[in-house]
Amino acid sequence: MRENTAVLSARNLVRRFGSTTALAGVDLDILRGGSVAIMGPSGSGKSTLLHTLAGIEVPNDGEVQLRLLGAPPVNITELNETRRSKLRRETFGFVFQSGLLIPELTAVENVAMALMINGVGRAAATEEAARRLAGLGLAGLEARRIGELSGGQAQRVAIARALVTGAQVIFADEPTGALDSVTGSEVLATLLTGTVGAGKTLVMVTHDQQVAARCDRVVRLHDGLIIEDSVTSHRVGVQR
């Protein structure tokens, strides 16, 4: 049963880039264990909102509170870069359109790297990375470099990397944008299963209405403001 509590709470977020206002006072609660699609036209502030929620960018005004189970609330916007970087490594996971994988490394090395950065030994990290890849249908492909994988396979590697550290919140920016519709649908199913299907939270930017409809909730932005926040029919009667 999903708890009706917010894992992330944003209040009055304002983000400016020179004379351009990307976020113009956004209030948003991200419920624990849910999936949220952020939509809007180019320049509406979608990616800026995602980056601000994730502590990649710091707002000019406003705050983002993180509430993890069993831990006191953390005001992400008050953390210095070192502490925000630690939070991104240990608590958040990221999947981007291009994957941002390291092409010189193999699939298993890309995933293991996320654990090794957090202090896990190479052998243990490699073993866990291989287990994650196998769970996403990539058994037997561990030793392939990223350029030797299809686009869908590479995105599954990116998903494995995002999940392998035990991240509680996964941020995805157009994760299916570079894929054909069939492959994109398969990758999205993998992403949803690995996140909300496992009690984690997914925050995703997408331009694709069909992708958004498979999330619990759709938030639409325009000129840096939320103009719609709606629960999708997908949420009704869904078994998690």
Image (cartoon, helix red, strand yellow):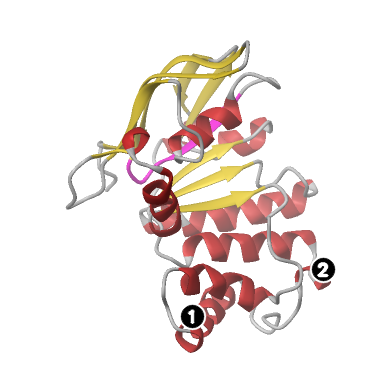
Say if residue 10 shows up in the picture. no
Where on the picture, by quarter, is residue 79? Answer: top left
The x and y percentages for residue 162 are: 52, 59
Residue position for label 2: 147
> How far separated are the C-alphas under marks 2 and 1?
22 Å
Horizontally, is 194 left or right of 210 in the view?
left
| Res. 221 image quadrant | top right
Main SS, magenta residues: strand
Could you tell me if the residues under marks 2 and 1 are in contact, i.e. CB atoms within 8 Å? Answer: no
Q: Is residue 144 above or below residue 180?
A: below
Check residue 165 in the rendering and tell me which mark sits there, or answer none: none
230, 162: nearer the viewer: 162
* Segment colored magenta: 32-39
Residue 17 drawn in magenta:
no
Is residue 182 visible in the rendered image? The answer is yes
Please report the residue visible at 46 percent of the width from the left and 41 percent of the height from the top: 54
| Residue 36 lies in the magenta-colored region | yes
Name the disc covering residue 125, or none.
Answer: 1
The answer to whether 35 appears left or right of 174 in the picture is: left
